Image (spheres, rainbow, N blue to C red):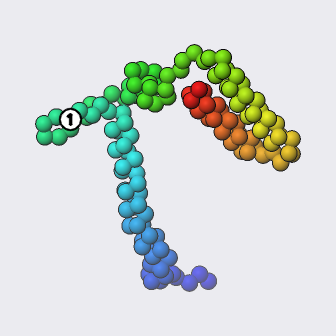
């Protein structure tokens, strides 16, 4: 025989969700809304006009300008021809990174994510060193 569930028992089961939901909605509003607005502003051209600002949606042109256009020196730096000393230093760095990866592989404590992480770190450091030389 299946006893009938009373209204109080149903409410008791739903109480945790009812009490937590307002807090979850507030946290989502204060984290998701600024993220969406920031993304919109990043994809727009901002112009100050009398009495406020004007936003014109231009898509990925801001990022294209940063990566490949006139503003390139602000974001990635300019890639000039490497001098012989620069090639030597970059070569030493590459050898050091290969030695670091070789020692990791030789240690026999290899994991997939560990290997991917080390390769990503090595590539990131390579580009930073290349920019600084």
Q: Residue furthest left?
A: 50
Picture coordinates of residue 77 (x, y %)?
49, 26
Q: Nearer the viewer, residue 24 or 109?
A: 109
The residue depicted at 79 percent of the width and 35 percent of the height is 99
Q: Residue at x 59, y 81 (%)?
A: 2
Q: Residue furthest front?
A: 85
Where 7 sits versus 109, above or below? Answer: below
Query: In the drawing, does residue 24 fall left or right of residue 97?
Result: left
41 relative to 13, above or below: above
Answer few, some or many: residues within 10 Å of disc 1's Cα (few below 14, many 20 plus, some between 14 and 19).
Answer: few
Residue 71 figure quarter: top left
* Secondary structure of residue under mark 1: strand
Q: Quadrant of residue 24?
A: bottom left
Residue depicted at 37% across the width and 56% down the height = 29
Horizontal relation, residue 52 to residue 85: left or right: left
Q: Is 2 drawn above or below residue 33 in the view shown?
A: below
Q: Position of residue 92 (x, y in %)?
A: 73, 28
Depth order, front residue of 48/39: 48
Query: Measured along the vertical axis of the image, is residue 123 above or below residue 117?
Result: above
x and y percent of residue 129 in the render? 61, 31
Is residue 62 found left or right of 111 in the rendered image?
left
Relative horizontal placement of residue 87, taking residue 111 as reference (left or right): left
- Viewer-proximal residue among 61 and 118: 118
User: Residue 67: x and y, percent?
Assistant: 46, 25
- Please name the residue that numbered disc 1 is placed on: 48
Q: How many marks?
A: 1
Where residue 11 sits, quadrant-wise, is bottom left
One can see residue 113 in this view: yes
- Looking at the rendering, in which quadrant would you find the C terminus? top right
- Image quarter (top left, top right, bottom left or bottom right) of the N terminus: bottom right
In terms of depth relative to the viewer, which is nearer, 61 or 1?
Answer: 61
């Amino acid at each position: 025989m299946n006893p009938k569930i009373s209204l109080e028992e149903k409410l008791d089961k739903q109480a945790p969700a009812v009490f937590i939901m307002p807090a979850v909605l507030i946290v989502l509003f204060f984290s998701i809304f600024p993220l969406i607005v920031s993304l919109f502003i990043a994809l727009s051209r901002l112009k100050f006009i009398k009495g406020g600002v004007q936003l014109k949606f231009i898509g990925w042109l801001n990022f294209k300008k940063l990566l490949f256009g006139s503003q390139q020196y602000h974001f990635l730096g300019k890639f000039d021809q490497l001098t012989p000393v620069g090639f030597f230093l970059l070569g030493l760095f590459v050898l050091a990174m290969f030695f670091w990866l070789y020692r990791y592989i030789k240690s026999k404590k290899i994991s997939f994510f560990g290997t991917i992480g080390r390769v990503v770190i090595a590539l990131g450091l390579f580009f930073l060193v290349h920019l600084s030389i």
